Image (spheres, rainbow, N blue to C red):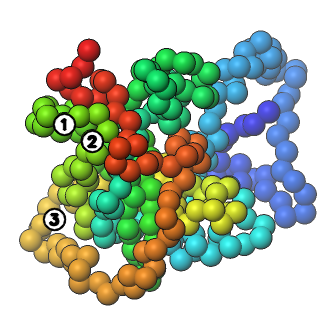
């Protein structure tokens, strides 16, 4: 059983119970009625307890881009999540910025003869949904990297849902046909120059050397200046003012999304566009 301890309770537990000589343990007093009731409930509701997502409740360790790249090269490194603050230098615009996913599990949909299919769900006909799969070039004080923003993280970055951006494009371009590549929307372009805090997943693909781009699973909200702060005193340094080695941008010819788009996002005519992502063309 996993037990998650939060905030002050976690601090108190660490202060009282942690020891370098032996592993910390938690004991349940079976003479206490609430303990017996809780364990009885847990035994009969194990499926509820298993819904806890360790990725969500575990505090990500703060790391710089350089530290992330260094961690990936360690032999003992494992799949892990980190919190990294970086500035967006550019958005990749010569490839698709979204993919069509299964509306249920968000795995990349497969195009069948007449329908969209999902290999993970085993369904021959599904409803497709547009999801972010956007590559960014980012930097911090010392290093440069490419991040791949997935799904809800894209919404957190732009404040816009993928489906809404795709629908808006097709509504404004009624002549667009299936297979047409929707250009990168202004909402993504507007993020250039922003300094944001990203939750990064170091995946098996990173550790195995199959992919250098780092996967973004969450983007934290922008910090709002405190009341009384003179906004005129805030100086924003544009990305062009920072000298970076452009050679570091070459991260490979393709990006593989481990969980959502394992086969990558194809360009041009290979792009699948779902009916409900076309706005006015919805059936």
Label placed on residue 176: 1
Which of 130 and 24 lies nearest the eye of the viewer?
130
69 to the left or right of 132? right
The secondary element bearing badge 1 is classed as: loop
Q: CA distance from mark 1 to mark 2?
A: 6 Å
Image side of residue 8 versus residue 18, left or right = left
Q: Are the residues flagged by discs 3 and 1 in contact, CB closer than 8 Å?
A: no
For marks 3 and 1, the one nearer the N-term is 1
Q: Residue tagged by mark 2?
A: 180
User: Percent x, y for residue 111?
Assistant: 47, 30
Residue at x 60% of width, y 58% of height: 202
In the picture provided, is 62 more to the left or to the right than 274? Answer: right
Q: Which residue is mark 3?
A: 229
Seen from the viewer's position, the closer of residues 94 and 156 is 94
Q: Identify which residue is drawn at 31% across, 24% down.
A: 275
Q: Residues within 10 Å of mark 2 (few under 14, many from 20)?
A: some
- Mark 3–mark 1 Cα distance, whole angstroms, equals 47 Å
Q: Secondary structure at mark 3?
A: loop
1 and 2 marks in contact (CB < 8 Å): yes
Q: Residues within 10 Å of mark 1 (few under 14, many from 20)?
A: some
Residue in the foreground of this view, choosing between 111 and 275: 111
């Amino acid at each position: 059983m996993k037990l998650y301890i939060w905030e002050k309770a976690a601090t108190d537990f660490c202060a009282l119970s942690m020891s370098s000589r032996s592993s910390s343990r938690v004991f349940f007093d079976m003479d206490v009625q609430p303990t017996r009731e809780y364990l009885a409930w847990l035994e009969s509701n194990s499926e509820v307890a298993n819904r806890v997502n360790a990725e969500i409740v575990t505090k990500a360790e703060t790391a710089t881009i350089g530290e992330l790249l260094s961690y990936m090269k360690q032999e003992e490194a494992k799949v892990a999540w980190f919190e990294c603050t970086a500035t967006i230098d550019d958005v990749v615009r010569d490839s698709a910025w979204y993919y069509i996913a299964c509306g249920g599990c968000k795995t990349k949909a497969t195009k069948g003869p007449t329908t969209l299919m999902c290999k993970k769900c085993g369904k021959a006909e599904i409803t497709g949904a547009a999801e972010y799969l956007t590559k960014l070039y980012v930097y911090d004080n010392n290093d440069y990297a490419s991040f791949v923003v997935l799904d809800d993280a894209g919404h957190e970055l732009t404040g816009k849902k993928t489906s809404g951006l795709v629908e808006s494009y097709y509504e404004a371009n009624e002549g667009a046909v299936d297979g047409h590549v929707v250009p990168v929307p202004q909402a993504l372009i507007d993020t250039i120059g922003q300094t944001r805090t990203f939750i990064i997943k170091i995946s098996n693909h990173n550790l195995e050397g199959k992919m250098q781009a780092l996967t973004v699973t969450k983007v934290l909200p922008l910090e709002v200046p405190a009341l009384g702060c003179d906004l005129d005193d805030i100086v924003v340094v544009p990305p062009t003012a920072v000298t970076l080695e452009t050679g570091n941008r070459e991260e490979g010819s393709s990006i593989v999304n481990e969980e959502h788009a394992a086969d990558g996002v194809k360009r041009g005519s290979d792009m699948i566009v779902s009916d409900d992502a076309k706005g006015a063309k919805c059936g």
